Image: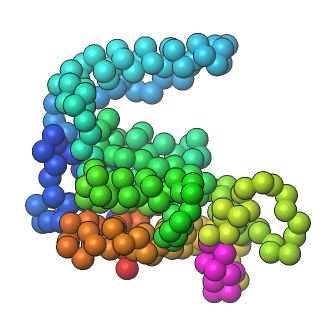
Amino acid sequence: MGGCCSCFLAGKPKRENPMHPSREPITRSGSSAAGYHHPPPMVTYSEGLGAANRLKVGFRTFKKNIYDPNPMLFDQLKSGQSPKYMVFACSDSRVCPSVTLDLKPGEAFTVRNIASLVPAYQQNVMHSSIGSAIEFAVTILKVECIVVIAHSCCGGIKELLTLKEDRPRTNHFIDDWVKIGLDIKKKVERVYAFLSFDEQCTKLEIEAVNLSLRNLKTYPFVMDRLAKGTLVLIGARYDFLCGSFQTWNEF
């Protein structure tokens, strides 16, 4: 597994190539691209604001601190997007990848769902949001790196680890979704039976990323780009309990 870092390398208007780590390491320390105006420290808004007003205040802050000071960036984005990264991250409100990885607008095409899971390729599915997002990112946007990010204290992973196949359904969608990881749940329970529940969850968070990386390789257009050497897959985990971020290459 790779070491900890604060963010991925920021993309330029002309994207640099992550296939050459000697010239462009995938991870690094420090801020993103030179010339990009970074926001001031994060503001905690008054809880007295109504829901819509909170969003409006937040937008005004964004416009003042990000949009207005970066006209060149947003002028470029008016003509289209050319992100280097596709990021799979959890929907958990504590782990926004744009914040934790210092990704600026236009840098990453992002999909968020429960536990950052990527199902295996399955054709003839009418409503395949994950498959369509992967296809769009890989074949149209031509992203150069797909990153799957787990995180500490993941509720989806806890749901998977406590899932009993013989129990009655207790929800409409969650059980069926996390069952994508049913085999790795059984592996963690078997191999790490001596660990506590929380420690097993940490192991399962990492196993879920590796499963998603394997599942990505079942998509023919992903395999085509991997075979050509124009795409890389990376696993990652953000631990907000201790403020660390680790990455590893798919295997």
Q: Residue furthest bottom?
A: 191
From the viewer's perspective, tell me whether residue 245 is left or right of residue 173: left
From the viewer's perspective, tell me whether residue 120 is left or right of residue 164: left
- At a point 71% along the width and 57% down the height, the residue shown is 174
Location of residue 227 (image quadrant): bottom left
Q: Is residue 172 in view?
A: yes
Q: Is residue 151 in view?
A: no
From the viewer's perspective, tell me whether residue 106 is left or right of residue 192: left
Q: Where is residue 242 in the image (x, y as percent from the top left)?
A: 51, 53
Q: In the image, is residue 58 above or below residue 12? A: above
- For the rendered model, the colour scheme is rainbow
Residue 124 or residue 234, whichever sits in front: 124
Secondary structure predominantly adopted by residues drawn in magenta: helix
Which range of residues does the magenta coloring cover? 181-192
- At a point 22% along the width and 31% down the height, the residue shown is 79
Q: Quadrant of the N terminus?
A: bottom left
- At a point 14% along the width and 52% down the height, the residue shown is 16
Q: Position of residue 204 (x, y in %)?
A: 60, 71
Q: In the image, is residue 5 above or below residue 65? A: below
Q: Where is residue 243 in the image (x, y as percent from the top left)?
A: 47, 50
Q: Quadrant of the C terminus?
A: bottom left
Residue 68 or residue 197, whichever sits in front: 68
Q: Where is residue 223 in the image (x, y as percent from the top left)?
A: 32, 74
Counting the numbered discs, the total is: 0
Location of residue 232 (image quadrant): bottom left
* Residue 77 on the magenta span: no
